[in-house]
Image (cartoon, helix red, strand yellow):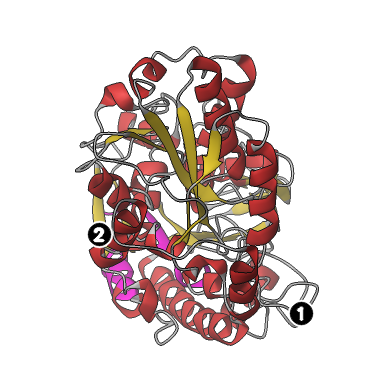
Amino acid sequence: MKLLLLILDGAGLAEADAGNAVTAGTMPTLFHAISKYGCATLAASGPAVGLDDGQTGNSEVGHLTIGAGHVIPSTLARIQTAFANGSWARNPTWDAALLGPRLHVVGLLSDAGVHGHWRTLIQAATLARRKSTLEIIVHPVLDGVDSQAGTAPRLLEQLRSELAHISAARLGLVIGRKWFCDRSGNLELTRTFVESLGAGGKLPLFTDDALARHVAKESEATFPPNLIEDETRPRPGETILIAQHRADRAVQVARMLAQRYNVFSLIDLDPMIPATRIFFPTEPLSECLALELRDRNIESVRIAEACKFPHVTRFFDGLNERLPSEAICIESLPEAALAEHPEMSIDRLEREVEAAMRVASNRLAVVNIANLDQVGHLGRYDLAVQAAAHVDAALSQILRVCHDENWTVLITSDHGNADRMIDSAGRPFGSHTERPVPLVAVPAAGVGLRWRQRTGSLANIAPSMLAALDLPIPGYMDASLLERTG
């Protein structure tokens, strides 16, 4: 049997309403498959994927959970636990990080927890104060993408309030994530952040009114660099702690900062930051689907656009490196071009998938289609509808080829996004949603599949894949939602 796992990134399940771009009207192929073959609804947020209650899922934890087949505490959860039980405070990395004369903490001011969290900024400053008398300067990067646009004033006030309880701690640079979170290779954006943080000319002094005026017109993600206080910029040789818990959108800035400062990080970001400066180094899983496949000599094909490629490789593989698979990475458009091209690179991705389906020796493929998530982050319903049309057209063609080549297809998602493009107050919404995602099984000719149950979580996908392949399910995995009947 041949099996394709097709991940429609950002496709949550919800009632059809004015802000939902994932409906039977916008994606008829998907919903026809749901009607014909049935559908399980999978939790993709909160404890079901190793996150806190109420925390929305994201691509990193989504693909990690899909590939693990069981719940893995997220990196954010690891950090929170380490703060609570004292192991972060006891981490010997602090000895070098607090040599002074000042510590600068840089990270995303977000309550979504996708790439960073405002609590982590406070926790890092709190521990640094407990262990030293250094001056601590926090430089918040405003979100407005993972966190709902317009929430920055509230989050900044929350950060101020918490920092007031930490002696010799103050705020420095305030800037939107546009210049901090680029992962497209646009070094001019990254350089703007680094120069603004350092000595790159005089900056306006921050005011709450300036931020309020900005978010009244557009997302805080584009808020220009402002200083809350003078003399807070890092000097050459001072220490910077990058307080992100997900790597992809912090790599460029980490690499550039490391050329000027002593950079420490919570997680592995770039070889320029040595392992001795990492508080929470990567811990590959010892139990996951990719290792089960390796032990059975089953190679797989992985296909995704560059913006999601690590998710179908590194994260799906449980953070293990160099496992046997054929990896096809499709070049992504710059994020600035998405509003003009909601189709992204889906035509090329579709061609690569079709070609892989026609290779007789291929037995398993994992594919991510990124449009509903990447375009969904723009917070424009009209563009999300266009993205949905492109994804659904590609889905139709891929299902046709899979039918011709006798592949079974499991269709799912990693988290919601395009299912809510307008919030309850009628404002644009471009963040992930807490909604469940579908799992649809489209069997190949002669393959019998039956639902064992219709509810679960992303952790049920890997065992369901093994069941569809008629392979044994290891005891550490959650239960399969499917069973073979022929």
Report how many numbered discs are placed on residues in the image: 2
* Residue that appears at 25% across and 66% down: 188
Q: What stretch is highlighted in magenta?
A: 349-373
- The spot of residue 288 in percent (x, y) is 45, 32
462 is higher (above) or lower (below) than 10: above
Q: Which amino acid does label 1 sit on?
A: Gly
| Distance in Å between CA atoms under marks 1 and 2 | 40 Å
Q: Is residue 68 magenta?
A: no
Q: Mark 2 points at which residue?
A: 328
Residue bearing mark 1? 426
Residue in the foreground of this view, choosing between 366 and 120 = 120
Q: Which amino acid does label 2 sit on?
A: Ile
The location of residue 480, given as percent across then percent down, is: 61, 40
Question: For residue 475, what is the image quadrant?
Answer: top right
Identity of the residue drawn at 59% across and 66% down:
11
Give the side of residue 325 with respect to residue 65, left or right. left
Q: Residue 65 carries which label?
A: none
- In the rendered image, residue 460, in percent from the top left (x then y), is placed at 60, 42
Nearest the camera: 380 or 314? Answer: 380
Other residues around mark 1 within 10 Å, as few (<14) / some (14–19) / many (≥20): few
